[in-house]
Amino acid sequence: MQYNTLGNTDLRVSRLCLGCMTFGEPSRGNHAWTLPEESSRPIIKRALEGGINFFDTANSYSDGSSEEIVGRALRDFAGATRWW
């Protein structure tokens, strides 16, 4: 994985970003097309294993459930992968 330095910081950010708009709870809001947590977690895990540490999410994605899913996955997988 290639990384760039984020601005004037020491943070190294992957050049690839995982877009997380499709992760969420289909029952929350008008998002029947979203992937539920059990389907989203393997994708997030694989991204981490591949060196991605840049995740695009927003509280407007799936009524905020995308951020919740990504946050839980990062918490659970961070100890098992190289982190930043």
Image (tube, grey):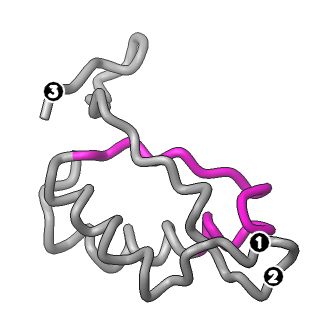
Identify the mark nearer the N-term, 2 or 3: 3
Q: Which residue is mark 1?
A: 31
Q: CA distance from mark 1 to mark 3?
A: 33 Å
Q: Residue furthest top?
A: 8
Q: CA distance from mark 2 to mark 1?
A: 7 Å
Residue 7 appears left or right of 79: right
Q: Residues within 10 Å of mark 3 (few under 14, many from 20)?
A: few
**Of the residues shown, which amino acid type is indicated by label 2?**
Arg
Location of residue 62 with respect to 50 vertically, above or below: below
1 vs 82, nearest the viewer:
1
Q: Residues within 10 Å of mark 1 (few under 14, many from 20)?
A: some
Q: Secondary structure at mark 2?
A: loop
Report the residue at 79% width, 55% height from top. Answer: 60
Q: Which residue is mark 3?
A: 2
Q: Which residue is mark 2?
A: 28
Q: Secondary structure at mark 3?
A: loop
Quarter of the picture containing the C terminus is top left
Q: CA distance from mark 2 to mark 3?
A: 36 Å
Q: Residue 62 lies in what quarter of the image?
A: bottom right
Question: Range of the magenta residues?
Answer: 52-68
Residue 66 appears left or right of 14: right
Report the residue at 15% width, 27% height from top. Answer: 2
Quarter of the picture containing the N terminus is top left
Asked if the magenta segment contains residue 23, the reply would be: no
**Of the residues shown, which amino acid type is indicated by label 1?**
His
Please provide percent x and percent y for residue 10: 29, 24
Report the residue at 26% width, 46% height from top. Answer: 52
